[in-house]
Image (tube, rainbow, N blue to C red):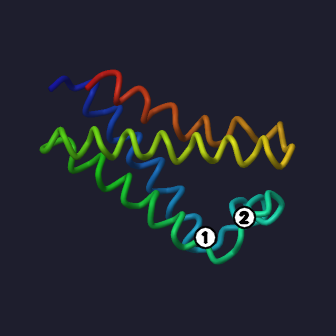
Amino acid sequence: MSTTYIVVTAVAAFMVGFSAFSIFINAPWVVEPLTEYGVPRTWWTWLGVAKAAGAAGLVVGLWVPAIGLAAGIGTVLYFAGAVITVIRARSYPHVAWPLMYAAPVVAALVLA
């Protein structure tokens, strides 16, 4: 396991974990767009849980590669869904945000 992989995975886990934390604390920069996109409030906690699980899975994956792979794939799929949601809401300038969070996860998967 290379140092690059460890660092990239740690950055990915931190970013995804921060995104989960932001939804849990109802940070305005997260919940206002979710409202604009039409994401039901009843989903927000579950979306945060999914992101938190992905972040934890990435960290565990440093010791158990199969879990890291599953977490990475799940997290990339999560953010792909986020991109689709943003596009569906026609909020095109916001497409970069979920891609920004997905990028380090994709990089960790490529380095795995």
Is 94 positioned to the left or the right of 61 in the image? right
Is 91 positioned to the left or the right of 23 in the image? right
Residue 55 is situated, as x and y percent measured from the top left of the image, at 37, 52
- Residue 111 vs 91, above or below: the answer is above
65 or 21, which is in the foreground?
65
Q: Which mark is residue 39?
A: 2
Residue bearing mark 1: 44
Is 43 positioned to the left or the right of 6 in the image? right
The kind of secondary structure element at disc 2 is: loop
Label 2: few (<14), some or many (≥20) within 10 Å? some
Residue 34 is situated, as x and y percent measured from the top left of the image, at 73, 61
Quarter of image, res 6? top left
Q: Residue at x 72, y 59 (%)?
A: 29
The kind of secondary structure element at disc 1 is: helix
Q: Are marks 2 and 1 in contact (CB under 8 Å)?
A: yes
CA–CA distance in space, label 2 to label 1: 8 Å
Q: Residue at x 69, y 75 (%)?
A: 41
| Type of amino acid under label 1 | Trp
| Type of amino acid under label 2 | Val
